[in-house]
Image: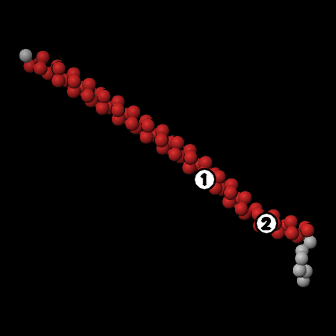
Amino acid sequence: MELVPDIDRLTQIFSNAVAPSFFLGAIAAFVSLMMSRLAAVNAHIKATRAVQIKTALRLEAAWHFVRSRAVPRLLK
């Protein structure tokens, strides 16, 4: 049994040892990218809902204003 392997065997050993770490790094980068895009989509959805709620509240307030002014005139 050879105690010190030759250079080709050492190259293969290091390659086999390092490859999984690069693969895990690529997976981590992909997951990070997907998380950041999901956060951007989530922020966009929240902003859209906020605009929808503001619009609904404005329409409701306008309806109440029109109604509060129109009803007394109709009751005269």
Q: Alpha-carbon neighbours of circle 2 within 10 Å: few (<14), some, or many (≥20)?
A: few
Amino acid type at circle 2 is Asn
Q: What x and y, as percent, mark residue 44? A: 48, 38
- Answer with left or right where residue 33 lies relative to residue 17: left
- Answer with left or right where residue 48 lies relative to residue 8: left
Residue at x 64% of width, y 56% of height:
28
Which quadrant, please, contains the C terminus?
top left
Secondary structure of residue under mark 2? helix
Q: What x and y, as percent, mark residue 33? A: 61, 48
Amino acid type at circle 1 is Val
Instruction: Say which label, 2 or 1, has the lower sequence index.
Output: 2
Q: What x and y, as percent, mark residue 18? A: 76, 63
Q: Is residue 10 above or below residue 22?
A: below
- Answer with left or right where residue 70 lies relative to residue 54: left
* Residue at mark 2: 16
- Given residues 66 and 10, the one toward you in this image is 10
Q: Alpha-carbon neighbours of circle 1 within 10 Å: few (<14), some, or many (≥20)?
A: few
